[in-house]
Image: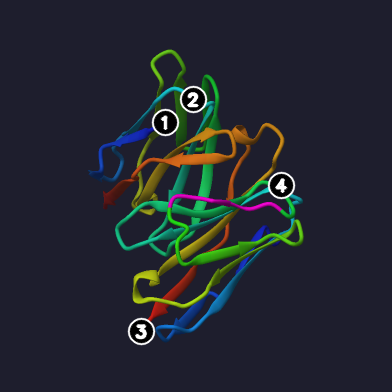
Amino acid sequence: NAGVTQTPKFRVLKTGQSMTLLCAQDMNHEYMYWYRQDPGMGLRLIHYSVGEGTTAKGEVPDGYNVSRLKKQNFLLGLESAAPSQTSVYFCASRAGTGSSGNTIYFGEGSWLTVV
Amino acid sequence: KNEVEQSPQNLTAQEGEFITINCSYSVGISALHWLQQHPGGGIVSLFMLSSGKKKHGRLIATINIQEKHSSLHITASHPRDSAVYICAGGSNYQLIWGAGTKLIIKP
């Protein structure tokens, strides 16, 4: 089983460039999340989605946009990359029904450096 | 405000020791998750608890609903258990994350 797959795994961007991180899950999960993790820090929620066609802001949404056009995919876009967005990005998903108690599955992470 | 607090922040122990990591949470959290993050970065779900106790190999997780407290125990700890252990409270759509406990097991 593929589970949660993130692409790309590594990327170096110049300040001002744009890019999209793709998260794909094959478990028919309703809920999907994008987190960032800075060195020595915990996970911070950027955006999340509770179903196809829906998105919502998390704790640190500024500078990011997301889309959930298909249930299995959750895209994270950086419109104009800044050095402060250098981080490791994690995508996660879990089933919708009885949501608070469902196991959460993470992708392997995407290492992004903005120079 | 819903919160999740973990202790200790850092823990170093010798191989074979019994390890306990604690997590306290506030009202509004209906399920408690324990996850493990290895130095390479990957995050794996260990347990999800809404009551009682769960065991998987050398790992045991308990939750006390009345006291709003959960513990993760590792028996016969081994250097390969070295990782960051994170608890997270499930509340509606989101998870509220603890800060993590960095565990180092020395041979």
Q: Is residue B35 left or right of residue A98?
A: left
Dividing the picture into quadrants, the one containing residue B50 is: top right
Residue A82: x, y in percent?
39, 76
- CA separation, marks 4 and 3? 35 Å
Say what amino acid the circle numbered 1 marks.
Asn
Q: Earlier in the sequence, mark 2 or mark 1?
A: 1
Q: Is residue B44 above or below residue B75?
A: below
Q: Which residue is mark 4?
A: A30
Q: Is residue A7 visible?
A: no
- CA separation, marks 2 and 1? 6 Å
Q: Nearer the viewer, residue B3 or B47?
A: B3
Dividing the picture into quadrants, the one containing residue B100 is: top left
Marks 2 and 3: in contact by CB < 8 Å? no
Q: Earlier in the sequence, mark 4 or mark 3?
A: 4
Residue at image position (52%, 80%) is: A18
Q: Residues within 10 Å of mark 2 (few under 14, many from 20)?
A: few
Mark seen at residue B2: 1
- CA separation, marks 3 and 1? 36 Å
